[in-house]
Amino acid sequence: MAYSKEQLVEMYKIMQKARLFDKKIATESKKGKLVGMFHFGTNQEALEGGLMPCIGPDDYIKPYHRNHGCLSLCDMKLYVAGMLERTTGYNMGIGGDYHQQDIRDLHLLPIDGLIGADWLYDTGVAMALKLQNKPGVVVTINGDGGAQMGGLYESMNFASLFDLPIVYVIVNNGVAMTTPTEKECKCSEISGRAAGFNVKGVSVWGQDPIAIREAMEAAMEGARRGEPALLEIMTYRKCGHYFGDPREYETPERDARMTEKYPDPIVRFEKVLQEMGVCTEEELKGYAKEVKNEIAEAFEWAYQQPRLTGNMTKGADKIFSNTEGGKL
Ligand SMILES: Cc1ncc(C[n+]2csc(CCOP(=O)(O)OP(=O)(O)O)c2C)c(N)n1
Ligand SMILES: [Mg+2]
């Protein structure tokens, strides 16, 4: 499918948002203004550039721990405030970086710290949509490590049996924490396993947002008809597991080989957009600057917001709510 300039620019900005947000976290951490563990998605940004425009207002998304590009869905100021433990941010600042959620308004589902557990929860959300006769597809993302957890296979079996509107996304980035993918699983492409559940499984090269978007649109279309799908994004994590990880487990030879196979998606997309005659170099610089400023403003605003205090996290009513999202 041919995308308009507006659509392509949106994809580019989402990719830049993912990259520049991670960079901002690195800068602020070095200044000692941020504490905590942060996971970056360096070199994986095409996945958000391709996926996020496919998420409509009725759909639900569960990102994973390396997905700042999913911020395109959020109010960035509220996200940063939530991340910086400010009471005016999402989840009153309790969620930290990757436990932010807004199920009711943004349809942003929570990320579980237990890798791979949320395949099951999100299948439950898809079941709820079906039972309530509501429109919308659930998109649930995890890594190749998360794809070795049994819950994915129970989930696919269940989703297939009950024709659920769900797309399982696997970010196969060549490593799970410190373990190279080839030492965690014998399949070079995990998507082949989907056939065992009569689920459509597709692997797509993860450096091209256009190819990802096309594959995702097809998966979403099927899921809306009750045909669950599995979409595997093949890429390479060009950073440590967490910010500050020295990556001693990665050999220079493997790194060079993987970098050649999975080149920088932003540099590549900039070249493609210029060759297609969609954008000039100056325009692209302008979009990146726009995104950078938006991030800087969000941090400036969030730093001024009131801090969470120890007492404010106490009480189950801060974590749980009634079915209307109100007080218990
Ligand atoms: C059940 C469980 N085991 C281990 C961990 C620790 N852990 C956090 S992230 C991670 C690696 C996940 O790898 P992958 O799913 O490939 O995602 P990636 O970090 O590579 O993007 C691990 C092992 C955890 N959070 N939960
Ligand atoms: Mg991985």
Image: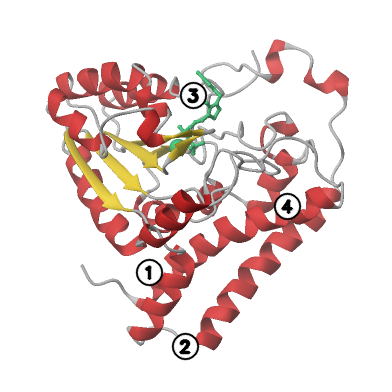
Name which of mark 2 and mark 4 comes first in the sequence.
Answer: 4
Residue 64 percent across, percent down from the top left:
49, 36
Q: Nearer the viewer, residue 36 or 70?
A: 36
Mark 2 lies within 8 Å of ligand 1 (Cβ measured): no
Mark 3 lies within 8 Å of ligand 1 (Cβ measured): yes
CA–CA distance between discs 3 and 4? 24 Å
Residue 146 sits in which quadrant? top left
CA–CA distance between discs 1 and 3? 33 Å
Q: Eyeballing the image, is 229 above or below 153? A: below
Residue 302 percent across, percent down from the top left:
79, 49
Pointer 2: residues within 10 angstroms few (<14), some, or many (20+)? Answer: some
Q: Which mark is residue 7?
A: 1
Image quarter where the N terminus lies is: bottom left
SS at circle 4: helix
Residue drawn at 72 percent across, 28 percent down = 94
SS at circle 1: helix
In the rendered structure, are the residues bearing label 3 and label 4 in contact, judged by CB atoms less than 8 Å apart? no
